[in-house]
Image (cartoon, rainbow, N blue to C red):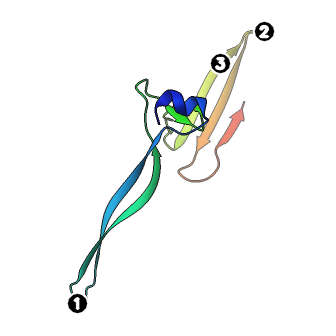
Amino acid sequence: APVDECKDKDMTYAAPLFVTAEFINNNTGEIKSQTVFMGDFPMMTEKGTFIINGTERVVFSQLVRSPGVYFDETIDKPTDKTLHSVKVIPSRGAWLEFDV
């Protein structure tokens, strides 16, 4: 369905994705080919957005911080004090944040 119709009817702007799969019997060498439906995949509009259930969505890529210890220093404007903070980012597990 066109983009405007998907917005009006609360539909997803998508197209079906089919894949041809080949199954090989190692004992006999027989090959069976079959087309498999993988699902309806959202398509990008000309504006670079997606229409999901009639709502226009934008994808934001997230930058992942590298593991390590990050130090930060900011000035608290009302008190003019220097604030220090530390972020510990492990390769696995929860992040820790300290204000000093």
Q: Is residue 88 above or below residue 56?
A: below
Q: Decide: marks 1, 2 in contact (CB < 8 A)?
A: no
Q: Decide: marks 1, 3 in contact (CB < 8 A)?
A: no
Q: From the top left corner, tell me how far across and down residue 79 is, in percent.
A: 79, 10
Marks 2 and 3, how far apart at CA: 12 Å
Labelled disc at residue 43: none
Determine the secondary structure under disc 3.
strand
**Residue 56 shows in this picture:** no
Marks 1 and 3, how far apart at CA: 71 Å
Determine the secondary structure under disc 1.
loop
Which residue is at 57% across, 38% downward? 11
Q: From the top left corner, tell me how far across and down residue 68 is, in percent.
A: 52, 42
Q: Is residue 90 above or below residue 97?
A: below
Instruction: Using the rendered view, name the quadrant where residue 98 is placed.
Output: top right
Labelled disc at residue 74: 3
Of residues 19 and 69, which is closer to you in this image?
19
| Left or right: 37 as drawn, with respect to 86 | left
Labelled disc at residue 28: 1
